[in-house]
Each structure stands twice: as C-alpha cells, then as structure tokens.
Amino acid sequence: MNFIDIVTIVALFVNTIALIVVIYQTMLTKQSIDSAKTQRQLEALPEVRFIIQTQVELELWKKDLQRRRNLLKEGIDENNNEKIRRASDTKITQPKDLNLNKEMYKNAPIWLRELWMSGAQYYYDAIVPLTTAPDYHFSQNWIDGPCENSLKGISELLIYLGNTIPPVILDTPASLSDADFFRDES
C-alpha cells in the first residue's frame, strides 16, 4: 500500500466521521427548532381561565336570550301580559350594566378579548330594546329581529371558542387545586 492509498483511506474515514457529525448536528438543530416552535405556540395560548370565563358569559347570555324569547312566545300565544312583562324586565340600560371584568379585558389575548366583546355587543344589542314598554307587536318583532340575530351571533362565537380548549381539559376533575400538587419548598 502506498502513501496515496493510505491518505485516501484516512481522508475517507475523516469525511465519514464529519458526515456523521453533520447529520447528528442537523437532527439536534431540527429538534431544537421543533421544541422552540412548540414553546412559542404554548406561550401564545391564552390563560385557560380567560377562555372559560368568556365561554361561561357567552353561554349565560345565550340562555338568557333563549329564556326571554320563549317567555315572550308564550305571552304572545296566551295573550298573557304578565309573561311579556317578565320577559321584558331587565336592568340593563347601558353597556356598563353588563359588569364586564376590566382585568380580563386588559390581560386576555386580543383575539379572545375581541370575541368576548363581540358577544357582549350581540347580547346588549338584543337586551336593551326590551326596556321599552312591552306589547305584542314589539315582542314579536324583537323575537324575529334582535333576539334571533344575537342568538345566531353568540352561537357562532361559542362554536369558535369551543374549538380552543380540548374538552378533556375542561372536564378535568376539580377536586384538588393546582397548589395541592406542589411540594412545599421550606
């Protein structure tokens, strides 16, 4: 074996080792990039409590509108002024009467804040006209107009919001608080 053959074999061996090192570094870099991407996605998620609070309020507004609509329908069908009066009875006369949480508005992600405020707008748009003196014609127009529009809007917001948190997280047993799982650091 001559000197050139030995150098060629050594060079091939060194190149093979270098190729293995490059492949290994590439795998590590890909894992690091994937990990950083996952971390960024997790950091971008809003706090679950904001999503849950938004969902609860949207559902309450939807149920309230449905209850009022059903009571108004009964009042119209039965010519029952008392049912119409009860369905129309609301203390909400201005947006502040919804008592929205300012801390949540400031701290929630923009997309969630906009979704929440959109739901508040739909609810307020439907509920405020009920403060006028109730009558049969007005009640039917309210059912067919603002109520139906707001129910449809709030329902769509709930569908969008429902896809944000997996149900398994929402159904987590609440028998223990998060703090119960941590060891005291004394």
Image: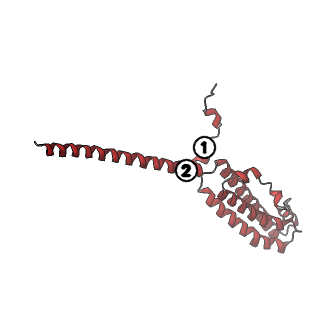
Task: Determine the image quadrant of residue 147.
Answer: bottom right
Q: Is residue 7 left or right of residue 119?
A: left
Residue on which disc 1 sits: 172
Residue at position x 11%, y 43% from top? Answer: 2
User: Disc count in the image?
Assistant: 2
Instruction: Tell me how far mark 1 sits from mark 2, CA to CA.
Output: 24 Å
Residue at position x 18%, y 44% from top? Answer: 7
The three-letter amino acid code for the residue at tag 1 is Thr
Q: In the image, is residue 181 above or below residue 98?
A: above
Residue at position x 59%, y 47% from top? Answer: 169
The three-letter amino acid code for the residue at tag 2 is Arg
Residue farthest toward the top in the current orientation of the protein: 186
Give the structural element (helix, strand or loop) at label 2. Answer: helix
Residue farthest toward the front in the current orientation of the protein: 3
Residue at position x 62%, y 60% from top? Answer: 160
How packed is label 2: few (under 14 Cα within 10 Å), some, or many (20 or more)?
few
Marks 1 and 2: which is nearer the front? 2
